[in-house]
Image: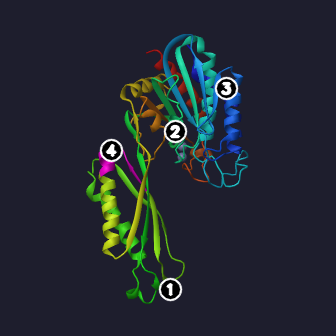
Amino acid sequence: MIDLLKEAQELFEYTQSLRRDFHKHPELGFQEVRTAGKVAKELNALGLEVSTGIAETGVVALIEGSQPGPVVLLRFDMDALPIEEETGADYASLNAGVMHACGHDGHTAIGLTAARLLHKHSEDFSGIIKLVFQPAEEGMGGAERMVAEGVLENPRPDYSLGLHLWNEFPLGRIGVTPGPAMAGADTFRIVITGTGGHGAAPNLSVDPVLAASQVVVTLQSIVSRNVDPIESSVLSVTTIRGGEAFNVIPEEVELMGTIRSYKPEIRDLVLERFYSIVKGVSESMGCEVDVSTQHLTPPVVNDEHISRKVQAVVETMFPDGELDVTSRTMGSEDMSYLMDDIPGCYIFVGSNNPEKGLDAGHHNPHFDFDEGALPRGAALITAAALDLMKN
Ligand SMILES: [Zn+2]
Ligand SMILES: [Zn+2]
């Protein structure tokens, strides 16, 4: 019986040094040149067939088992965020204004560790592992571009697996939820145009600040009054920009934000109400409005059967651990572009540790995680892949 957790723990120094190296040298989406170079070098060192330059900086490698069998895609994202790091860690970012504040440095290190484990055991499985190291997950469309560039062909995967180190969970907890696990995301931009003028003579202006304020407030009625309270949806206005001086009514105000939902029919409803309110409210106040939305990602929906199998793997590997079967988030993940076509499961690997001060949230300048989660993630995704190969 192979003890993958023990094997992954024996590789801890390898995994940790990779993670800290990636952390020191974070790169934004589609610019992961150094990271991808290191990934390719590690995979080449295993003697694998490696393809680079997919969607700019994506890397794909195949590990073939001893016999033909299912193809299992494992996906790891590599990009960092435009955030100035404030952790003070001795492996903190050396690139000003760029930081691995989501844990993708850990995902990349986990992927390379899983590659080592799977390569070592390639005589023991039937099928093919397709390792996908993806650029630009953070709202830049890396997964969609990899799909467009053929990542789901030659060979076409039968199953897909992905994971996220998760600082909303303590180290030790693993989240595997059948069905919807992460929301689909849309973004919006609204420009409300009025007629500028003197702040003391509003009667001679058409005030876009007041119209924008009404729009922000009225948009909040969609989730609270139109969406079925049993369903989930979010609408957040996240920027509001307009005006320069206390005595000038500006010409225009710009608003931006995001809409999240799990189901297509809820998304359709929210978008329909969104356009109607933005146009209706703005125009009723005498303003002109220009509004656009962009569909960022579909929801991540875990396949029922695969999720049950992964849950069983978790329970075997971590008998004293905490399997969470209800973890869902309104956060989004472009892994959904792969999972839309290839049934799969997306796993949350608990990684916070308040005792060590490692509990800041994702995308926070103080974000860091307990590296004890790295071997757990590597062992788990390896074991789940091997389990899927048995079918
Ligand atoms: Zn993120
Ligand atoms: Zn992330």
**Residue at the disc numbered 3:** 43
Residue 73 to residue 295: above or below: above
Q: Within 10 angstroms of label 4, few (less than 14), some, or many (20 or more) residues?
A: few
**Residue kind at label 1, given as amino acid type:** Asn
Residue 379 is a magenta residue: no
Label 3 – label 1 distance at C-alpha: 62 Å
Quarter occupied by the N terminus: top right
**Type of amino acid under label 3:** Leu
Q: Is residue 267 covered in magenta?
A: yes
Looking at marks 2 and 1 on the same chain, the residue that comes earlier in the sequence is marked by 2
On the image, numbered disc 2 is attached to which residue? 143
Residue type for callout 2? Ala
Q: Residue at x 42, y 70 (%)?
A: 192
Is disc 4 placed on a helix, strand or loop?
helix
Amino acid carrying label 4: it is: Pro
Q: Which residue is mark 4?
A: 264
Q: Secondary structure at mark 1?
A: loop
In the rendered image, is residue 129 in sight? Answer: yes
Q: Is residue 372 visible?
A: no
The residues colored magenta run 258-268
Q: Residue beneath label 1, please?
A: 247
| Left or right, 32 with reference to 183 | right
Picture quadrant where residue 24 is located = top right
Dividing the picture into quarters, in which one does residue 288 lie? Answer: bottom left
